[in-house]
Amino acid sequence: MLLKHHLLQHNFRPAGQIMQTLVHASDLVPDTCRYAGLAVLQQGSNTYAECLQYYKQLLSKKNSRHREEILLEMTFYMIFSGHLQEAEETMKSYLQVDPFKSNSLLQGYAGLYCYVLWKEKLEDMALQAAGGQSSADLYAREALSHWRTLIGQPGCWDPFVLRHAEILVHFDEADKALDVLLQYQQNNPTNINSYRYLIEHNELHRKDSKLAEKFLRDLAVLDPSCPEVLQLAEVLLAKDSPNYTEIHEILSRFMDYPHNSSEIKAVELLTIVLRNVPIDS
C-alpha cells in the first residue's frame, strides 16, 4: 500500500527506495517488479549511480531469470546516459564469467560497442594527427575478437556482420571480409539481407561480374519480387548474347506482384526484352 501511495503521488524517490529494498530482500525478482523498479528510478530524480546500483543488484541475484537480458539493458542505459566507454568496459568484465561469457548475443553487442568507440576515435581528426590511429585500431581488433566465432553460428547477426566486414576492409582484408559474408549467407540461406551484403561488398570492393550475377540470381530465387531483380535483368541484358526468354520470365515473375506491376524501370526493361524475344516463346 505504501508503494502504491508513493506512485499515485508521483513520489518516485521513496518509491524507488521501496523497490530497491524488495529486490535486495528477494533471491528471485519477478519480471514485473524488475521493470516497475527501473521505470520508477528513471522517472524520478534518482541519479545515474542509483539506477546503476539497481541494475547491479538485479545482476547479483544468482537465481534471477534473464540475467543476460538485464546486463544488456544495463549497458544500453549507460550508453543512453552518455557513458559508452563505461558500457563497453562493464560488458567486457561480465563476459569473463558464467553465464555471460557463453552468450553469443552479448558477445555481439560487446563487439558493437568496440566498433562504435573505434568509429568515434577515427572521426577525431586531432587524435589521428597525434598518432591515435593505432589506438583507435585497438578497438577495431577487439571488436573482431568478439565476432570471430559469432558469424559462423546459426542465427541472425545482421547488426554485427556488416561492421565485421567493414573493419576487415579497413585493414585491407577485403577478401577475408567476403569470406565472412559468404559464411554468414551460407548459415542464413533464408535471410535476404545476407545476399544484399554480398552484392554490396562485391560492388564496392571486387567488381566481379560473375559473382554479381550469382549473388543476384540467388537473391531473385529467394525473393522474386525484390528490387534487385531489376539489377539482375540489367546484368543479363548487358551480356554479349542475352537470353531474352529467361529475362522475360524473370521480369514477368517480378511484375506479377501487385506492388511491382507498375514499376517504371521494370516496364522499360520488359519493353527492351519484348523487342528481342522470339515470338513463339
Image (tube, rainbow, N blue to C red):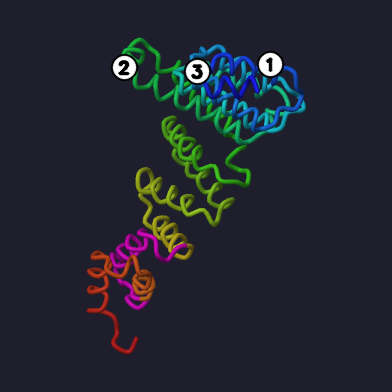
Q: Determine contact: label 1, label 2, CB under 8 Å.
A: no
The residue positioned 40% from the left and 51% from the top of the image is: 199
In front of the other: label 1 or label 2? Answer: 1
- Is residue 142 visible in the rendered structure shown here? no
Q: How many marks?
A: 3
Residues packed near mark 2 inside 10 Å, few (<14), some (14 to 19) or many (20 plus): few
The residue positioned 38% from the left and 12% from the top of the image is: 131
Find the magenta span and give its range. 223-248
Residue type beneath disc 2: Met
Q: Is residue 14 above or below residue 268?
A: above
Q: Which residue is mark 3?
A: 44
Q: Which residue is mark 1?
A: 21
Q: Secondary structure at mark 1?
A: helix
- Is residue 201 visible in the rendered structure shown here? yes
Tell me residue 63's x, y (percent): 77, 27
Quick one: 89 or 33, which is closer to the camera?
A: 33
Q: Is residue 274 left or right of residue 208?
A: left
